[in-house]
Image: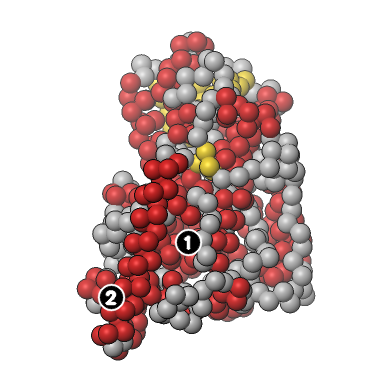
Amino acid sequence: MKTLRLILGDQLNHNHSWFQQTDENVIYLMAEMRQETDYVKHHIQKVVAFFLSMRNFALYLKKNNYQVVYFEIDDAKNPQHLEALIQQTIEHYSIQKFEYQLPDEFRLDEQLKQICQKLSISTEVFDTEHFYTTRTELAEFFQGKKLLLMENFYRMMRKKHDVLMVGANPVGNQWNFDHDNRKKYKGEVPIPKAKTFRKNVEKVIHQLEKMEVKTFGFIDAEKFNWPTSREECLEQLDYFCHHLLKHFGDYEDAMHTEEKFLFHSRLSFAMNSKMLSPKEVIEQVVHYYQQNEAEITLSQVEGFVRQILGWREYVRGIYWKEMPNYGQMNALENQNKLPDFYWTGKTKMNCMKHSISQSLEEAYAHHIQRLMIIGSFSLLTQMHPDEVDAWYLGVYIDAIEWVEMPNTRGMSQYADGGILATKPYVSSGSYINKMSNYCGSCHYNVKDKLGEKACPFNSLYWNFLDDKKEHFKNNQRMAMMLNLLHKIPAEELYQIKMKAKEIMGGWILFRTIFLELFQL
């Protein structure tokens, strides 16, 4: 029986059971498709990274004697659409059975189900063998509970998978070291240079230009720095353990004008493409910590483990529990459009300039830049979650919908009404000043609410609370801030709200002119 096995661009799992042995009757199908480049506008580095990783994976399979059918983006025989691709390959090779791995995006999951219903041959679906959890494990864990607290889920995962445990107790008799992971970086600890790979990617860029694939962001065609093979991903993991883990936890929430990456691992693309599994990443990090406990404190490692074993698995569970309705949620009824500087980085707000410019230059920003700078500003200015969703999904190299949407629409924009977060993650300029050096060299004054040079975050923050006070009046976690809001004198609050409306109205008008001039 001739079997066709489909491998999607984020299913590059070298250790999958499919590859335990070769079979001359099995053909593996991979393709770079306009269907995937065009459903949202992507960062150029994101498209290049996925295509290179897919090509390296196909090359690995061929070298190990697997039969592979691979279509590059500019191949004249590439149908550019998944259904046509599968039908064409089945007919050409007289395939009798079609197999695929569970997609991690709802749209692809639905599409493949529909394709299989139309096929006249037998079909079978397999797990990706990547995550710690199944799609439904989180929903089953929280069944009958009103609050889906990540901490409860995280502790269950630690126990179940015996990670940083001594019997039934956590190592160090403490589950969570989040309080120790909030240091501001002041240059007191030298940061090793980021691991680089410096590959020439001119061929891929030329192919994208030839096919007129629309992208945004920047790329250095001769010095592309992201890992795109399993060997490079393992190098990145090893580099993190040896050079960055020692101070990761301390500064994981910090931001600095001169340091784009600080002590972050930048392993998210390697994991989300499945070139690395979360299990092997955690096992290597924990093992390295255990071998170097004299130099590395537990808080550094626990903070890292929490992001992967806790948060990463948690948001995936939320995604599959709540889709497809999750993608349409807009609990706060926000309607504004993104300003033009989300595509240029040109703004006088130093925090936004650095965070957005870095996103455009590197296809990367760490979680606090995404959540408490860009995300907070997006929510304070009451942007439509569809707009924010599309930008985050496009701009970041690690953004695949299962992980991007809960983080953006849920955690960042509170559009899900509190399914994922118990309160909106917004702040005035004081938090940004506490966790970064952005404010010191900013055009605006972080302490002022009013005036020409008042920090926009300040008036926007209080305006947001006032605009949404009815929505949050019964939210206990918002009670203190709402009490402070009520203490602001009416005239001052009026001036604050006028300042906020001026800020929002100004860039909305400018964006309209910008789009008309440049036809974006």
Q: Which mark is residue 82?
A: none
Residue located at (77% from left, 75% from top): 294
The secondary structure type at the circle numbered 1 is helix
Most foreground residue, 51 or 502: 502
- In the picture of the structure, the residue carrying the numbered disc 1 is 374
Observer able to see residue 250: no
Drawn side of residue 373 relative to residue 112, left or right? right
Q: Give the x, y percent position of residue 394.
A: 48, 45
Q: Is residue 312 above or below residue 306?
A: above
The residue positioned farthest toward the left in the image shown? 470
For residue 252, side relative to residue 448 (left or right)? right
Q: Residue at x 44, y 57 (%)?
A: 407
Looking at the image, residue 164 lies above or below residue 398: below
Placement of the C terminus among the 4 image quadrants? top left
Could you tell me residue 13's position as x and y percent? 59, 39
Q: Pick the residue in front: 420 or 218.
A: 218
Q: Secondary structure at mark 2?
A: helix
Mark 2 or mark 1: which comes first in sequence? 1
Q: Is the residue under label 1 in contact with that under label 2 (CB below 8 Å)? A: no
Badge 1: how crowded within 10 Å, few (<14), some, or many (20+)? many
Mark 2 burial class by Cα count in 10 Å: few <14, some 14-19, many 20+: some
Name which residue lies at 72% across and 25% down. 63
- Residue type, mark 2 in image: Asp
Q: Nearer the viewer, residue 400 or 451?
A: 451
Residue that label 2 marks: 466
Question: Is residue 485 among the parts visible in the rendering?
Answer: yes
Q: How far separated are the C-alphas under marks 2 and 1? A: 21 Å
Q: Which residue is at a point 72% across and 64% down the rendered structure image?
A: 244
